[in-house]
Amino acid sequence: MDPLKVTPPPETKLHFLDYWRIIRIRKTIILAVFLLVVITATLVTFILPELYSSTTRIKVERDQSDVTPLLGERGGGVMGYDPYFIQTEFELIQSEVILDKVIEDLDLNKEWGKKYANGEHLKTSETRVLLKGRIDLRPVRNTSLIEIRVTSDKAEEAARIANAVAVAYQSYRRDQRKKLSEGGITALEDRFKKEEAKIKEAQTVVDELRVKLNISDAIANAEGPSPLMTAETLRKLESLRIESKAEYVRQHTLLERLKGLSQDLGPEGLAQAIPSAAPDPGLSSLLDQVIMADQRLVALEKDYGPKSAEVIKGKALVEDLHGKITNRVDGIILGLDARVLSLSNSLDNLEKEVQLATTNDVMRANQTRPYFEAKRQLEELLRFRQILDYKIASERIDQDLPKTTMVEIVDKAVPGLHPVRPNKPLNIALGIIIGLVVGVGLAFFIEYLDTSVKTIDDVERSLQCAVLGVIPQNVGLLVEEGAESPHAEAYRVLRTNLLFSRKDDKLNSIAVVSAGAGEGKSTTVFNLAAVFAQSGQRTLIVDSDLRRPTLHKMLHVTNSLGLTNYLLKQNTLEEVIQTTKVPTLDFLASGKLPSSSLGILSSTQMRDLIGELKLRYDFVFFDSPPIMGVSDASILASEVDMTLQVIQYRRYPQPMNIRAKQLVEKVGGNLVGIVLNNINMSQDESYYYYSGYYHDYYYRSEDSESATRKETAPGEQAKLDIKQKY
């Protein structure tokens, strides 16, 4: 298993240190923008002319009088809350009506013409635009107050204009209210005259109808046609008719019933029923006498016998009484019959009298209706004229009432003692804040647009490959600087990681590639090979960048003989390999490349050469051209054992580096890792661990050992010497 194979880290949120890293890296841009904005704000602040401000406050109410009008608020109506009133007044104060009045009162066309038009009078429209730009209206919260703030280069002029605007608005509101009242009163008076003419015409019609219809004063003064009978009399007649009809029905029913009983029961039976239905004192007395006579006759028959004179006398008395009862019953029946007839006649007369009176009333009402309709119309006209007259009088009174509370100037404007603009401390402070915000924002925006490699995490996340080494900025040649160079440890770390990345110890040919030119590929090959050679391993550097070779310049040797001469079989291998200052480090230059041999690296001779060099040396390093532009790098990656990809810090976009890796993998190359090159340690503290930490630690340890040697006796010096690691 590859010990340096890493799993791609998951997406993580940015830490505060990531933001701080961006600020440190882009501090030049931030500082430049900050200074530009601050200097510009300061210069503009001191160049701008000084402006003074004056404020007047007015109290604004809806149209009303100082005292309650005769008919209450606006003729007795209820005025509701208007949420747009203050805003409407804002627009009115800034309207042409008010501003033109101010311009006329203060003669601003002439005065500002001297200032802005070389003495020529300005047009009112031009002056209005200037004046409107100097006015600032502000409401006082939760009140009906409005602040009129005017700015000018002269304090006295600002105060004068502010007061003039308030006065012009106050006069306009009063004049407008008076104008509306006068217009309303005029309209009411015209309507009053028309109503007078209508009343005269209606009065003439009423008088003509009264004469024509012969209407008396009593009827004329009534509200409508008077009936011949009063309502009370009519109600009494109607009540009497109803009672008479009820009595007639009752008596007629009784009579018919008694006649029916007479046929069924006879006179004797009818005599017994009449006292209950129609009580009669005479009939009741006769019935009592008959009962007593019958009782006496029974007693006499017991005492004297049926043939005695007393009994015969008693029987005659009983018969006489029965005859009287029969006659009395007949008389009662006749009386009831006569009464029913009388009630019938009386009921007929009452109905005729009521019907006649009603008919006469209807006829009279129809005859007098035109008169009363004309009279009603006349009364309505009179009432409407009275209302108009009352309204005109109340409006005239309301018009004369004082109306100072509609617009009241609470505070007059006074000349300002100090200019309000430009506010130098505020402008400079805003310049500082805006400069910082814009600078930092621009830095982050540029960082967002920059898709190049910035951190190790970027490499491992995008390329899915381990970073074997981190090389700092401004690295020199280790052959010239020596093994104890401050930058040597970075390459020793790279060497160690590379050795542990090998899956087999026989893998000893290494090609170094990059996506584009100028990423430090040649320097990385040279210094990495130097570190391997300084550790005692036989190492060869092959400059296989046939188009732009640079390694011979680093070693200060000739490029007349090299790789191309051997591949073209012009020279032997021993003739083209050169030695260097380091005993275990050899160099094979690129040689001169004929234009007809551009594909020489893909030849069989090249593969044979690689196999031969692997047998002769412990490690063979191949420098190559950029893999994105030339096919040579891809060929080398497919023929050597291992490939290192060099990525320069913040140079090329990540997609370009990903494409380079894909090209290596496509040709079957063994990409063992990434070398992140040219790191600016002073800007990016996240890389300090890879180089600066070791540098401080190593050299402080060396200083400590030197001090220890000085304090130790010469005889003990050999015992305290510590053998270097490399």
Image (cartoon, helix red, strand yellow):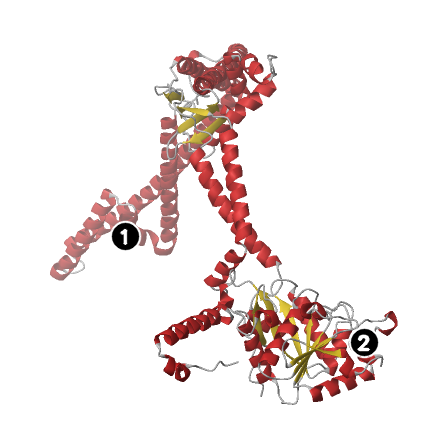
Q: Nearer the viewer, residue 637 or 150?
A: 637
Q: Residue furthest left?
A: 303
From the top left corner, tell me how far across and down residue 323 is, in percent.
28, 47
- Dot 2 falls on a residue whose secondary structure is helix
Q: Is residue 323 left or right of residue 665?
A: left
- Type of residue at label 2? Thr
Name the residue rendered at 31%, 46% in the picture.
329
Distance Cα–Cα, label 1 vs label 2: 172 Å
**Of the two numbered discs 1 and 2 in the rendering, the one whose residue sits closer to the viewer:** 2
Q: Which residue is mark 2?
A: 564
Among numbered discs 1 and 2, the one appearing first in the sequence: 1
* Residue 638 in view of the camera: yes
From the top left corner, tell me how far across and down residue 317 is, in percent.
20, 49
* Residue 465 in view of the camera: no
Name the residue rendered at 30%, 48% in the picture.
277
From the top left corner, tell me how far across and down residue 582 is, in percent.
63, 77
- Type of residue at label 1? Gln
**Residue 587 falls in which quadrant of the image?**
bottom right
Q: Nearer the viewer, residue 526 or 282?
A: 526
Q: Is residue 586 above or below residue 315?
A: below
Quarter containing the N terminus = bottom right
Q: Which residue is mark 1?
A: 272
Q: Residues within 10 Å of mark 1 (few under 14, many from 20)?
A: some
Per the rendering, the mark at residue 416 is none
Q: Residues within 10 Å of mark 2 (few under 14, many from 20)?
A: many
Q: Is residue 465 above or below residue 36?
A: below
Q: Is residue 248 above or below residue 57?
A: below
From the top left corner, tell me how far across and down residue 181 is, in percent.
47, 16
Q: Is residue 500 left or right of residue 50?
A: right
- Dot 1 falls on a residue whose secondary structure is helix
